[in-house]
Image: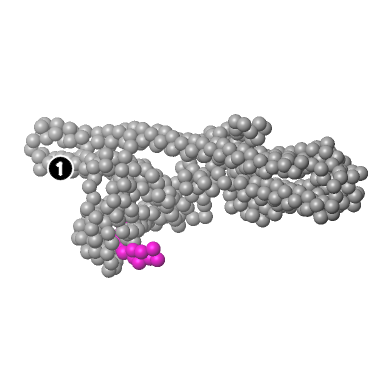
Amino acid sequence: MAEWSNAPDSKSGIRLCRIQGSNPCLCGFAVDDARIMNRKSSFAGLGNSAFANLTEAPVSADQGEAWIRGEMIRSMMQTTRGVHYLGALLMFAMVGLSWGYVPAWQLLGWLALGLTSIAGRSWTERRYKTQYADKGTDAQSEFVQRYRFVWSISGFVWGLSILLFFERTPLVNQFMSWVVVAGVATVPVNGLALHRPLLTRYINTLFVTVLLGAVVVASVLRLSGRSEGPHFPYGFLLLPVLHWGLLFRAASRIHESARNSLELLFHNRILIQSLTQQRQAAVAAVATKTRFLASAAHDMRQPVLALSLYADWLRNEPELVHEIAPKIVRATHAVNALFDSLFDLARFDSGQVRLHIERVDVRQLLHDLELQYRPLAEAKGLAFRVHPLPGTFMTDPIRVRRMIGNLLANAIKYTEHGSVLLAARHTRRGLRIEVWDSGIGIAREHLPNVFLEFFKVTDHAGTSDGFGLGLAIVARLSQVLGHPVSVRSQLGRGTVFRIALDDADDTQAQLRMSRMLP
């Protein structure tokens, strides 16, 4: 048996069908915005700084902040990739500037410590590339939280370099060593600014270590009573403090610029998504109206033509009035039924349906439907069974009776022998009403279309005198009232429609109806 479990559809109000053992039939769309989401963005004042290739932005505004945060981390890792190798070269330069003035074991010890930290950075980058680069925001945040100590160690190692040159090498060498330290503090800012916590760890650790190291060296010299040597002007230590503040100010601007660009990309994605949906909805609406008018004209022509023929027949042979009059009445009823259905759909499309939500007793609802449809079933030789249960729910009683009535009418119409069952059942999700029949059934390939206007299975008996609007009205009422409808059928054995009796809310119902407007 093919079962169809549905997710709400914006047009029909029913759920999209899922056949057991297969994937759901979903209507999607493609937006050619890869250029927007994958392009690299450069910002004024950033020089060569650029975003990494961006992942596809989410379509929900609620997910925007998380997506931006993840992309900032991803772009930071892309931008700072390989920078530590430049740091390795600068470490050798730092050792060269102090060689001959500082004991070799101190220089080599610091160099070994520095190269170890660079090896750790390199390992961290490889781990990020293999395990985190292609994952979502949570994985990006997890990576930063787990390996943030690597940047602290790097800043600490470079801060310790102050102990190698400050007041221990000639002034020229000291100046050049200061330039190196300033460089290793400045170069990573371009990338680390994209994630402030890592920037703060690296910059603060480096400058705090530098300043504390300078104080330690000056204190040792003062305690040792040393009075000769290349004394560096201690007022110069205010420059690193100034540099420290300027780096944070520049990083703040870089961060804001990058964030604004990502927000713009995200909102562009949302806008593209919205415009695409609106365009597709407009195209679908035009196609639906075209099919609607063509089908309506075709279905209306038959009873109107019959009326014309009967009228001519009656005019030529008035003595056959008792034979022709019932035929004219049936043709007139067919035209009225078609117009009633068309007017119902038109009222839904124009938002003119006024709902009256109240508490409805399930047992009484089924009893009223039984009184109306049992005679129709018995006149066709069908057994009409009812399985009521106690319970109440909030809904519009007239509209929900119309929903179930349309399903019962279809069940009786397409069942030649056997029975029709109207049942209420308790489920874990609440009450639901089911309409079973032992009729001709619906083929699997036709199930997704049964709720469309004017859809009729041409090779099924009994469809020629129908208009294909009953289930379309059920679908509209389902969405407005918030009573999801599902269908399960097997060709040649019968069909079951299920309506979930979730409590309707008048405000939500009117809101859903307004969303249905073209």
Residue 430: image x %, image y %? 36, 64
How many numbered marks are there? 1
Residue at 19% x, 41% y: name it. Answer: 336
Task: Determine whether, in the image, residue 385 is placed left or right of residue 76.
Answer: left
Residue 53 appears in the picture as rendered: no
Residue at 85% x, 50% y: name it. Answer: 226
Residue 78: image x %, image y %? 67, 41
SS for callout 1 = helix
Q: For mark 1, does the 10 Å Cα neighbourhood hold few (<14), some (14 to 19), or many (20 or more) residues?
A: few
Query: Does 430 lie within the magenta span?
Result: yes
Task: Determine whether, in the image, residue 229 is placed left or right of residue 513.
Answer: right
Query: Does 464 lie within the magenta span?
Result: no
The majority secondary structure of the magenta stretch comes to strand
Residue 237: image x %, image y %? 72, 43
Tag 1 residue = 329
Q: Quadrant of residue 370?
A: bottom left
Which quadrant: the C terminus?
A: top left
Between 418 and 7, which is closer to the camera in this rendering? 7
Residue that lies at the very extreme toward the left in this rendered image: 319
Residue at 92% x, 44% y: name it. Answer: 100
Region in magenta: 416-431
**Which amino acid does the dot numbered 1 rest on?**
Val
Residue 321: image x %, image y %? 9, 40
Which quadrant: the N terminus?
A: bottom left
Residue 340 appears in the picture as rendered: yes
Residue at 67% x, 43% y: name it. Answer: 241
Above-or-below relation of 372 to 171? below
Above-or-below relation of 301 to 122? above
Between 76 and 444, which is closer to the camera in this rendering? 76
Task: Determine whether, in the image, residue 512 is placed left or right of residue 89.
Answer: left
Between 25 and 60, which is closer to the camera in this rendering? 60
Q: Quadrant of residue 306?
A: top left
